[in-house]
Amino acid sequence: MTSLTLAKALNEGMRKAMEDDPKVLIMGEDVGKLGGVFRVTDGLQKDFGEQRVIDTPLAESGIIGTAIGLALRGYRPVCEIQFDGFVFPAADQIITQLAKMPLRSLGKLRLPVVVRIPCGGGIGAVEHHSESPEAYFTHTAGLRVVACSNPVDGYTMIQQAIRSDDPVVFFEPKRRYWEKAEVDTAASAADWTPFDQARVVRQGSDVTLLAYGPMVKTCLEAATAAEDDGRSVEVVDLRSLNPLDVDRVVESVSRTGRCIVVHEAPIYNGFGAEIAARVTERCFYSLEAPVLRVGGPSTPYPPSRLEDHYLPDLDRVLEAVDRVFAF
Amino acid sequence: MTSLTLAKALNEGMRKAMEDDPKVLIMGEDVGKLGGVFRVTDGLQKDFGEQRVIDTPLAESGIIGTAIGLALRGYRPVCEIQFDGFVFPAADQIITQLAKMPLRSLGKLRLPVVVRIPCGGGIGAVEHHSESPEAYFTHTAGLRVVACSNPVDGYTMIQQAIRSDDPVVFFEPKRRYWEKAEVDTAASAADWTPFDQARVVRQGSDVTLLAYGPMVKTCLEAATAAEDDGRSVEVVDLRSLNPLDVDRVVESVSRTGRCIVVHEAPIYNGFGAEIAARVTERCFYSLEAPVLRVGGPSTPYPPSRLEDHYLPDLDRVLEAVDRVFAF
Amino acid sequence: MLTPEGERVEHPDYDIDLTPEEIRGLYRDLVLVRRVDLEAVALQRQGELGLWASLLGQEAAQIGSGRALAATDMVFPTYREHGVAWCRGVDPVNLLGMFRGVNHGGWDPAEHNFHLYTIVIGSQTLHAVGYAMGVQRDGAENATLVYFGDGATSQGDVNESFIWASVFNAPVVFFCQNNQWAISEPLEKQTRIPLYRRASGFGFPGIRVDGNDVLACLAVTRKALADVRSGQGPTLIEAFTYRMGAHTTSDDPTRYRVASELEAWKLKDPIERVRAYMFKNQLADQDFFDAIDAEADELGKDVRKRCLALPDPEPLAIFDHVYAEPHRLMEEERAEFAAYLEGFEG
Amino acid sequence: MLTPEGERVEHPDYDIDLTPEEIRGLYRDLVLVRRVDLEAVALQRQGELGLWASLLGQEAAQIGSGRALAATDMVFPTYREHGVAWCRGVDPVNLLGMFRGVNHGGWDPAEHNFHLYTIVIGSQTLHAVGYAMGVQRDGAENATLVYFGDGATSQGDVNESFIWASVFNAPVVFFCQNNQWAISEPLEKQTRIPLYRRASGFGFPGIRVDGNDVLACLAVTRKALADVRSGQGPTLIEAFTYRMGAHTTSDDPTRYRVASELEAWKLKDPIERVRAYMFKNQLADQDFFDAIDAEADELGKDVRKRCLALPDPEPLAIFDHVYAEPHRLMEEERAEFAAYLEGFEG
Ligand SMILES: Cc1ncc(C[n+]2csc(CCOP(=O)(O)OP(=O)(O)O)c2C)c(N)n1
Ligand SMILES: Cc1ncc(C[n+]2csc(CCOP(=O)(O)OP(=O)(O)O)c2C)c(N)n1
Ligand SMILES: [Mg+2]
Ligand SMILES: [Mg+2]
């Protein structure tokens, strides 16, 4: 067991993947000497050289487009998008090429490309640096979309994503980069939770909170606080957004009868909408109340002095818990 | 009253807008002499000249980016994206600039830009020519998103979109371009249905079908067919996807107790998810069954020989009607 | 190197010496790919294809460059490179699949070192550069050749690919078929200077070649490929040619271009000049030409027959190949759809 | 035109004749914007700003080009153009808003003909070209000037903007401040030839100017603006300069660049050379310099004071200005949020 921050756990995970497979490459803006603006790739260029850790020109479409070409040549590129809000210049390459080329080739071409995106708010940043664009990608068939919430998952899921033969959009909650946990880097990969599985991170019987990425911790805190009101709150870390581990979710909600989805992204047509629709379809008769959604307002991310109001927090989650019981 | 195809109605609407306001411009690939690949801009360059109907270089980001600049200079550009699948190179300009600049300026800048997108399948086309990308835009705060389903709305809604001071993504169901209806081009604009309002296009009492764009006609046909089974089906043409005319929808669903959303886009995190989640929240106690979603499979759009299987049709809608009653 | 009248002209920098056998081979290629193309247009007219993008007029650009390739070189085409596909040994019937709507791409790119057709304008240029960066990392000496049109040069992706190729000195050759039109838009909507000069702004050589001269295209492409193989970095080739047909079978060029332009280009036909040259220099006799024509007809018939026999995919194929690894949602939707279909049969 | 030692050199093509008064004005600008910048860095260090992007070292490029503008010209900046903002009469405190997190852009672009700061690299270049196309359509003679960095030249958007400007002969001047770095990436990660040469590939003139020479920047920009006003089309100016500070206050340049580079550029300081020139030529006396320094200190204090007084926005401002016209969803969410907030107060 080693105590690692999320940033370091991801770093160690990539390092391990690069050691295991010489085809694994890292590419992105400032990923080399600087080690990325969050230092997630720190030291990798020093140890693996410029051929494997590539500081690219400043062009996100170029990053993903050339990563696709490298994958076609047998490489496994791990691309860093510097901040969530800068993924959009790459949208075309991700949506029309990365996601669709495998089907286009009737499975003859596989694109093991990982697109790492530090995401979410809470760090007092300027515009475009605090967004949660996951819904753009969960709606894009052909991609896997996952989100890690803690160092253990950071370490394992990044390696699983790299090993996957499917393209993976990998969300990292930037405001959790510096939070620590004990990571068992010696555990066998066979014992890791598959990266398309959800995990019940706290058991409860009255209401299920569904979250991923940065909001898992917030929900755990809310669950603890709700205990004082005598409410037993279950928290599920979804981990995989596409595919959703719907059976585990349904199992939980059928038991608790109440469900709240929590994410930072704007509510309107956010990923919470898919969960709410799907869970309702499967759990219609066990639901005591509609699935509630707690998320960002359906507005662009506000200036940082307002972000504490914008982002779901303990109070907002607890208020939703009250509401779901009041139904 | 004039009998117009949808394509011609849109053409006449744009012509009217250009006559009414010299600041209205048309821009896009092949919109000039060719009149667009669907002839929706036919004759406009001939009559308004190359300064107002601009054949652009082949670059969608450039189209939207320069349209933003033109809007900043006081123009009202109407941009054509040639096909749904080609909007993604413009994703960054639409999502980070067009949608967010008004807020960024605290309302000092307004961007009356219309992005016209011929959308949807059913015309036997090759890849990228049959998609329904609306969810990418409904989730993007700052944009209005509308879809017309018939010539009357084509004629009026395009003019309303052009007059709006907000950026509007305007979906046109390409397989309906050649369908005709009587359009009253003399009616006063004050009498037009506001373009952010839904419309009940068929009244019924047992189940509400919610649709927009190409699926409105399909739903109307299904409603007629369901009559034979003694089922009274209400059909609502949503018209505006952001904002959703939620009160009208809720009014209908509260009455019928059953709701089915129909769209061509892939189900997973599609716009139907938002409707289902929202309607369920508002109508929880009046719903006899969960809101069902009929849509494309959560896969990339298939080769055209499979599109009849992929696209929701009469049978798929009727099957959902059966299911919603069986709940 | 070959005038429209079939005169052979020497060029100081780019000379090639071809055997009569090789010249005959090029002629055969040109005729056969034109024949396949005509057949495809006919198939479309008869409703057997949803669409076809004709290469008419661009045969020399494609065969010249395509025949310059080594088998181990990799190619990234647009949707119009039927002639290059031919050079890469792709069965012409496989090209028809996507236009008939039975698939989105019907051959194995690895088998032919010929990537799938790409429809989103310009996006393949980045794939090609990435692929070439992979070749570099492998320490291999293969070249990568990427095709795109005049219109494509306006896309951000194409310009980014120039930047990447130049910064990484990637072993890639950019082959722009300037056929003067991007659907209805003439060249001046994309540029105000000749396209080959674009390269100079990115720091690598650009060259214009007569795209209707198969020998010139062959010579210039060979040289550029040799350059990248020896580590000299990218070249942009602009093959100056003309789209003799409509953009695709859905298009109506009479709306935007004048007949005289077409007539002028007819005089520069890429096949006629090779034929004239061969005649003049007795590289082939009438029997040879007749035999090629007969072979072309056979090929056309064969392509037609096998096109009609292309099977429609099974409905459940919608869910195939979307993911490489098991994916819950796909399995669930597939099962639901299978049940739905059974409902009809039952 | 002004050596690092403060010698005035003539240039055949770009000469300007400035009065001593004008020179003193430029000097004052340079000193004041540097002072504002230093104050902002200090404010960030003290937690009053979330971030700051310093212009240190780039003052001459910004003041030279900014002072070349006519009031009716339009400017599109990046996030670092504090010196240009100064020339456009934007109150420096307004620049701080977005870095403090109280807004995303704090001035009225129309009032100053100075667009908002744009963070998404390169996207403003297309806005500038579109704006210039509007100017063209108005039959007006204003120029548009757009700023971007060396890193930005790799973005598709910037290259598309070159294409559009060239095809439409748009009255726009591209001003690239090549400060040698894009965060941690040196110039050679973006290009292998000088950036000004990029323009030639698109068919318009490109020129490199000493970005630390305020007179040269002024002269070259004036000429380019005059050219576009008289319909001669776009120019790309590459101002060769250096980012003396960190990329932003979040950055740590010691991880990726050597101190000696910084030392070398210190000798080329844009302010020192003007001061030396003025001294040598007795364009100002010590009193003048002292007065400017005092004015700078006053300005710094004033900016600090007013920065601290910038009010935080009201929570419900989240819903303001997202749409120009009434929007149901905004109204609904605003009402819900208001009720939620009241719940706490109650
Ligand atoms: C991103 C994108 N936008 C638009 C289109 C529609 N489109 C298909 S071909 C074409 C013109 C292409 O012109 P060019 O690059 O010169 O190639 P050519 O067809 O002449 O071979 C256009 C606009 C597309 N396929 N992709
Ligand atoms: C599209 C996009 N990608 C990445 C970033 C993150 N980023 C901010 S500044 C910067 C470097 C910009 O370099 P340059 O263009 O040279 O301008 P400079 O900062 O040196 O003035 C990067 C990568 C961004 N803002 N936008
Ligand atoms: Mg062309
Ligand atoms: Mg820079």
Image (tube, coloured by chain):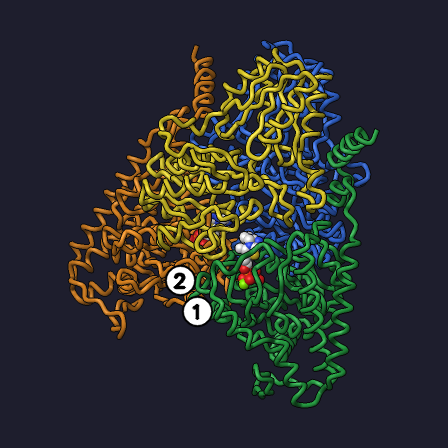
Chain colours: A blue, B yellow, C green, D orange
- Closer to the camera in the image, B286 or B93: B286
Identified by mark 2, the residue type is: Ser
Q: Position of residue B145 (x, y in %)?
A: 49, 34
Q: Residue at x 61, y 11 (%)?
A: B285
- What's the chain of the residue with tag 1? C
Report the residue at 73% width, 37% height from top: A195
> In front here: D17 or A257?
A257
Q: What residue sits right under mark 1 in the picture?
A: C193
Q: Report, in whole angstroms, how far the alpha carbon at label 2 lies from the one at label 1.
A: 9 Å
Question: Label 1's element?
Answer: loop
Q: Quadrant of the N terminus of chain C?
A: bottom right
Is residue C229 in sight in this rendering?
yes
Within-10-Å neighbours for mark 2: few <14, some 14–19, many 20+: many
Q: Are marks 2 and 1 in contact (CB under 8 Å)?
A: yes
User: Is residue C102 toward the left or the right of residue A327 in the image?
Assistant: right
Q: Is residue A30 visible?
A: no
Where does residue C116 sit, x and y in percent of width and height? 69, 57
Q: Is residue A317 left or right of residue C342?
A: left
Label number found at residue D166: 2
- The x, y position of residue A219, in whole percent, is 61, 23
Under mark 1, the amino acid is Ile
Q: Is residue C260 above or below residue A181?
A: below
Q: Is mark 1 within 8 Å of ligand 1?
A: no
Across and down, in percent, residue A48 comes to 67, 57
Name the residue at 74% across, 71% down: C296
Query: How many residues crowd mark 1 within 10 Å: few (<14), some (14–19), many (20+)?
Result: some
